[in-house]
Amino acid sequence: MSKSNWQALRPIFFAFLVVNLLLLGGSSLLRQKGVDVVALAAANLILALVATVSFLLTLRSLQSQNPNVFVRAVYGSFIIKFFVIAIAAFVYIMIAGKAVNKPALFSSMFLYIVYTYLEVTTLLRILKQKKNA
């Protein structure tokens, strides 16, 4: 992977780092509010990994001259995200049973929006820089 790809991943890595630092620093406050910090940290890790894979898949497709490759990459990354997040949520709900922590689930949905926003804006910025786009 080239140096520019690593530089393009900075926003996702930075968001992952900031969320983890906030979880560590504010864990007592989050527990007082009823948030399961461990579930939220696991969701943050899963979302960061899925966003990274999706980003790299789409970024690699931008280098192809065939526009179908980009469309397949976008659809493929959506399917990957959907199934990984659905499986993770299913596993969490099955393990937690009736003790599912709704604040952690809703916070995870917010994190999904953040990671998706960072992924799309970074890809759009790279796409604007391309000469033949």
Image (tube, grey):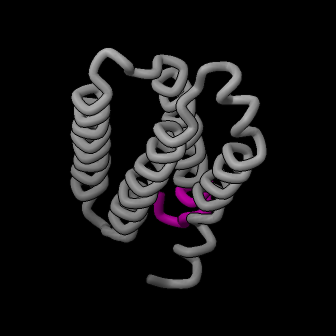
Reply yes or no: does residue 64 show up in magenta: no
User: In which quadrant of the rendered view does residue 64 lie?
Assistant: bottom left
Q: Is 87 situated above or below 19?
A: above
Image quarter of the N terminus: bottom left
Q: Nearer the viewer, residue 66 or 123?
A: 123
Residue at the far bottom in the pictured view: 2
At horizontal 25% and vertical 62% (from top left) the residue drawn is: 66
At horizontal 44% and vertical 59% (from top left) the residue drawn is: 52
At horizontal 69% and vertical 39% (from top left) the residue drawn is: 27
Q: Is 54 situated above or below 31?
A: below
**Magenta stretch in the rendered image:** 125-133
Residue 40 horizontal/vertical position (percent): 52, 38
Q: Nearer the viewer, residue 26 or 28?
A: 28
Q: Nearer the viewer, residue 104 or 60?
A: 104
Residue 71 in sight in this render: no
Residue 87 horizontal/vertical position (percent): 22, 38
At horizontal 37% and vertical 68% (from top left) the residue drawn is: 60
Reply yes or no: does residue 132 show up in magenta: yes
Residue 59 horizontal/vertical position (percent): 42, 63
